[in-house]
Amino acid sequence: MKKRWIGTALCAAMVVASMSGCGLKEPEAPATTAAPAATEAPATEAGDATEAAGGEEEAGGADAAAANDPAVTLIYAEVNPLDTIVGQTDSFFKEKVEELSGGSITIDLQASGVLGSENDVLDTMLGGGGTIDMSRISAFALTSYGGEKSMLLSIPYTFVDRNHFWNFATSDLAPEFLLEPHENGTGVRGLFYGEEGFRHFFTKEPVTGLEDLKGMKLRVSNDPIMNGMVEGLGASPTVVAFGELYSALQTGVVDGAEQPIANYKSNAFPEVANNLILDGHTLGAIQVIITDEAWDGLTENQQNAMMEASKLASEYNRKISEDAENKVLEELKAEGCNVVDVTDKTPWQEACKKVVEDNTSAYADLYKQIVDMQ
């Protein structure tokens, strides 16, 4: 029997050798043939190994995608210093974009107005050429640049408090407002909303109430709502570029202006106008915008990184804004700034009634939706 088995095995070996020599394939083992027990991994271990390999492959694919993204530098304009609420938001956004893009995007943050006023920046961005790719701007600044709906955010006494604004900024309406300039073909789009606190008037001479503003020359940007509001309050609107405001106050070109509290202090305006009245006429709604040209030049992976950073930066802004504003207000009081609170805003609201009606009539339903979000 043993000899017969050995003979059979030798014959089989000769057949295989013969087939190989003739260029024929060795027959595959039947599907039912089991692998030796010593080399067979348990089913659960095999599954885990396959899953782990898939995870590594997926992670490797993501890393490879990031590694294959082109290096991009985006010029980002900010009119305020970096220690303001908006400046801190800018810095956080920059950090997150660079981190989430795997370093393929660099944000070149140019602060303190070195690239011009908000209108100068918008003119440059819309003019093309890529010299400014991104900016943090006041939402109302977009009114003349294809963002007509953003005008509603700067209507006096629209937002009763911060939560009211954030109810809007996190609503289904917010993306509609952010993308309006892009959809109107002006060449920019909004990425996210934030705020820099309520805006208040500050003056060279003490102001105790609404009546003291009458006849004063108050600095405004070239914005119809701001002009109408100042006129409604009995003052004289005077257009002055933001970068020239300090000297305009110093030389008497204007008697006062308005800004959020943190910006008022960071730009050293108390040195030349040390009186602040907390009328809170508008909440300083902001947008971070990017040119369509810059956006279209990013890969899908980079665009996703930008959107995730936008979400995180908006949340960060909401977290720091109120505390930062309260801290600055206490510092101003300690430094001798004459701070006057407004306990009854009804007269101020009545004085602005006409400018509210004139600028919301075309968007009455939309404006009512915003008002009702409180």
Image: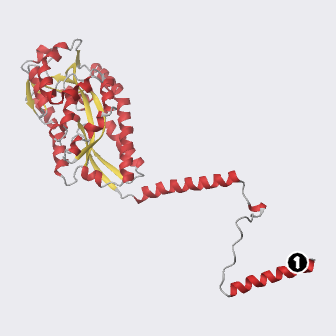
What residue is pinned by disc 1?
A: 5
Residue 314 screen position, x and y as percent: 35, 35
Q: Quadrant of the N terminus?
A: bottom right
Q: Nearer the viewer, residue 40 or 109?
A: 40
Residue for point 71% across, 71% down: 29
Helix, strand or loop under label 1: helix
Residue under the image location 29 percent in, 51 percent down: 295
> Dividing the image into 4 quarters, which one contains the C terminus?
top left
The foreground one among 191 and 320 is 191
The spot of residue 370 in percent (x, y) is 26, 26
* Residues packed near mark 1 inside 10 Å, few (<14), some (14 to 19) or many (20 plus): few
Left or right of residue 236, residue 151 in this image: right
Q: Which of the 4 quarters of the picture holds residue 118?
A: top left
Against 12, is 359 above or below? above
- How has the structure been colored for display? secondary structure
Q: Is residue 220 visible?
A: yes
What residue do we see at 51% from left, 56% from top?
Answer: 60
x%, y% of residue 32? 73, 64
So how many labels did they put on this image?
Answer: 1
Relative placement, left or right, of 63 versus 48 is left
Q: Quadrant of residue 210?
A: top left
Q: Nearer the viewer, residue 4 or 57?
A: 4
| 157 to the left or right of 161 | left
Q: Is residue 143 above or below residue 155?
A: below
Q: Residue extending furthest right? A: 1
Is residue 81 among the parts visible in the rendering?
no
> Measured along the vertical axis of the image, is residue 366 above or below residue 16?
above
In the rendered image, which quarter is residue 329 located in? top left
**Disc 1 residue type?**
Trp
Percent of width and height locating residue 190: 27, 41
